[in-house]
Image: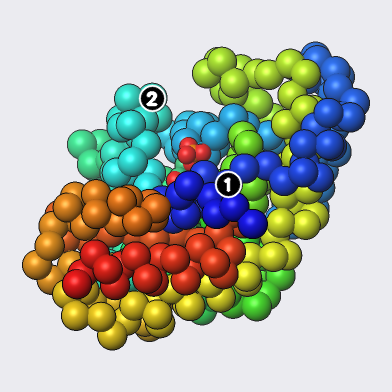
Amino acid sequence: MKRKKFSDFRSDTVTKPTEEMREAMARAVVGDDVLGDDPTVKKLERLAAKTIGKESAIFVPSGTMGNTLSLMVAGEKGTEIILEEKSHIYNYESGNLSKFVGLIPRPIPSENGEMPIEKIKENIKVSLRMHIPRTSMIALENTHNYHGGNVLSLKYIEEISKIARENNLHLHLDGARVFNAATYLDVDVKEITKHFDSVMFCLSKGLCSPIGSIVAGKRKFIEKVKFWRKSFGGGMRQVGILAAAGIISIEKMTKRLKEDHKRARMLAEGIANYNGINVNLENVKTNFVMVDLVEMDAFTFLEKLKEHGVLALPFSDKRVRFVTHNDIDDEDVFRGVEAIRKVLE
Ligand SMILES: Cc1ncc(COP(=O)(O)O)c(C=O)c1O
């Protein structure tokens, strides 16, 4: 069989829709979704709400839009949101928190994506005087992108949810990869999502849909998200074509993520003893492998790796990230292990 040109470990966003998705997309019954006429979108939204364990759900074009809309609806302008210092919402969403949402970020550093409980408590502000903005929200990220796909423990989430309830704060989950977290913990995803007031998750990453994310929460909340989605130009017409793929993402692709986790581990174990890099095997929990370079810089390493047909992404000058997904098989992993060996030689 002809080997593909590149084994692409850059991200799980590079996944192509499966053949089954392409067929479902071609056959999808569609209508104008802005007018509420698209039965395939309705089916996806019902399925998503049921799967996540919320009253209602809405299909949105991207994870960034899903997070932004959730925060716009839940937060009150000029109040504070507590979130992890390296979180996607704070660092990688084009400054939307300030540009559109109007919440004041209160970032808290952490080792692994779990902000220390005591630090969260210390930073919750009740506005006793009019010049002090109060806290209105907490956002968590699970799995945590920057922290190597780390999974927050259920005990931790439970504790944060208790604090949020006691302080009347909205708790939002950036669950772009929440099904990877559920797979790692070997629990139904609802065991994670039940603690949150709103949840965003992506269909277009490890779940292989070409486009799309979901926001789920209470019916009233989702109605408001729908209003803001239209304002942002995210009201889409015959979008059942995309929803048809999303249905397969939820019904089928969520069930295969353990394969990606197994391959991430294979890759990590295959390279862990190489000189010139460090890989912390304990941190390889889901589909990410973070590789720290001892001497070579990330740019040179990735250029050389590309010559061997392997792609990955730089995370910093000395750190690169490999991600496994549906379009990475065992052969790709062996190729990756071998290519890294050659580059380090
Ligand atoms: C944790 C996390 N949240 C949100 C997003 C945003 O998703 P999108 O690229 O669909 O806007 C990403 C994308 O990589 C992510 O990793």
Question: Coloured how?
Answer: rainbow
Q: Is residue 8 left or right of residue 244?
A: left
Tag nearer the camera, 1 or 2: 1
Percent coordinates x, y for residue 89 in the rendering: 38, 44
- Residue 130, horizontal then vertical, whole percent: 25, 36
Q: Kindly tell me whether residue 113 is visible in this rendering.
A: no
Q: Position of residue 62 (x, y in %)?
A: 54, 34
Is 265 situated left or right of 133 in this image? right
> How far apart are labels 1 and 2 at the CA level?
30 Å
Residue 13, relative to residue 30: is it above or below? below
* Residue labelled with disc 1: 15
Q: Amino acid at mark 2?
A: Phe
Which disc number belongs to residue 92?
Answer: none
Q: Which residue is located at x 47 percent, y 77 percent?
A: 265
Name the secondary structure under disc 1. loop
Residue at 80%, 15% in the rendered image: 32
In front of the other: 198 or 319? 319
Q: Position of residue 216 (x, y in %)?
A: 66, 45
Note whether 260 is above or below 14 in the view shown: below
Q: Is residue 105 visible?
A: yes
- In the rendered structure, which amino acid carries the disc numbered 1? Thr
Q: From the image, tell me which residue sits under label 2.
A: 100
Q: What residue lies at 58% left-to-right and 64% top-to-bottom?
A: 329
Determine whether the residue tagged by mark 2 lies in a helix, strand or loop: helix
Quarter containing the N terminus:
bottom right
Q: Of callouts 1 and 2, which one flags the residue occurring earlier in the amino acid sequence?
A: 1
Residue 84 sits in which quadrant?
Answer: bottom left
Q: Quadrant of residue 283?
A: bottom left
- Ligand 1 contact, mark 2 (Cβ < 8 Å): no
